[in-house]
Image: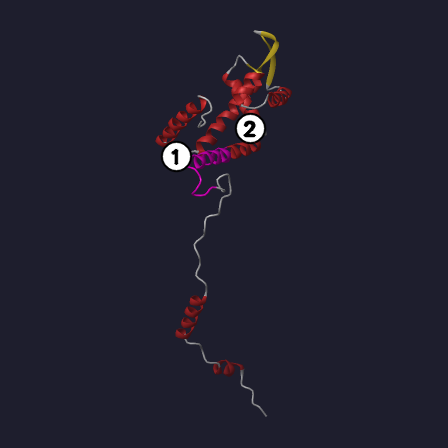
Amino acid sequence: MTRKLPAKAALKAVPAARPAALAAQANKAASAAPASQPAQPAQVFDLESRLTQDHHQSLKLWLRMLSCTTMIESEIRTRLRNEFGITLPRFDLMAQLQRHPEGLRMGELSKRMMVTGGNITAITDQLEHEKLVLRVPDPKDRRAYSVKLTAAGRRSFERMALVHEGWIADLLDGLSVQEKNDMIALLSRMKGHLSDGPHQDE
């Protein structure tokens, strides 16, 4: 007959693991585990994604500027929609009218915003429905109309413009004052160059 050991005796019969042995096992397990790799920055896919080192420098510059503009514009569109329930084209049209309290013709708005007359008409219709702008007969041409901000439109735009300016300052906060001045000067030169007309090699 097999004699059963009391519970306490059974526990004593199991040899206690030595601290040195446990430490060795822990070190072995740690060395076997794969070393953690540093986190890699997420790859950004945008207008510059197709560029290679062989592309012309001017193309690289153009796509870099366009990418930055698109990123800022996308962020401003989202913030305007979430904060004020307004689209960027409507905000831009109100901004033009704010600078010209006497009003602007539809054709002038189209040139300034660089969009078609049909788009200007649609935006104006929406703002007029909300009583933010109104059409008034042009004193110089009774067949034409000018668009002006209403009193409610001025108050609404001033409130949005103050917040909008803060957003832009925040988005461009990564550049110093001197760097911004340098970029303004360089882009002014380029704008003047482009305003002279198309430049093509003959």
As for residue 60 lying within the magenta part, the answer is: yes
Badge 2 crowding class, 10 Å Cα cut-off, few under 14, some 14 to 19, many 20 or more, is: some
| Pick the front one: 133 or 40 | 40
Say left or right for 132 vs 26: right
Say which amino acid is labelled 1.
Leu
Q: Which residue is mark 1?
A: 175
| Pick the front one: 115 or 97 | 115
Circles 2 and 1, Cβ within 8 Å, touching? The answer is no
Quarter of the figure with the C terminus: top left
Q: Quadrant of residue 121?
A: top right
Q: Which numbered disc covers residue 88? A: 2
Say which amino acid is labelled 2.
Leu
Q: Residue at x 48, y 26 (%)?
A: 162
As for residue 84 lying within the magenta part, the answer is: no
Q: In the image, is residue 182 above or below residue 128? A: below
Quarter of the figure with the N terminus: bottom right
Q: Residue at x 49, y 28 (%)?
A: 164
- In the rendering, at what x and y percent does residue 165 appear? 47, 28
Q: Residue at x 44, y 31 (%)?
A: 169
Q: Which numbered disc covers residue 159? A: none
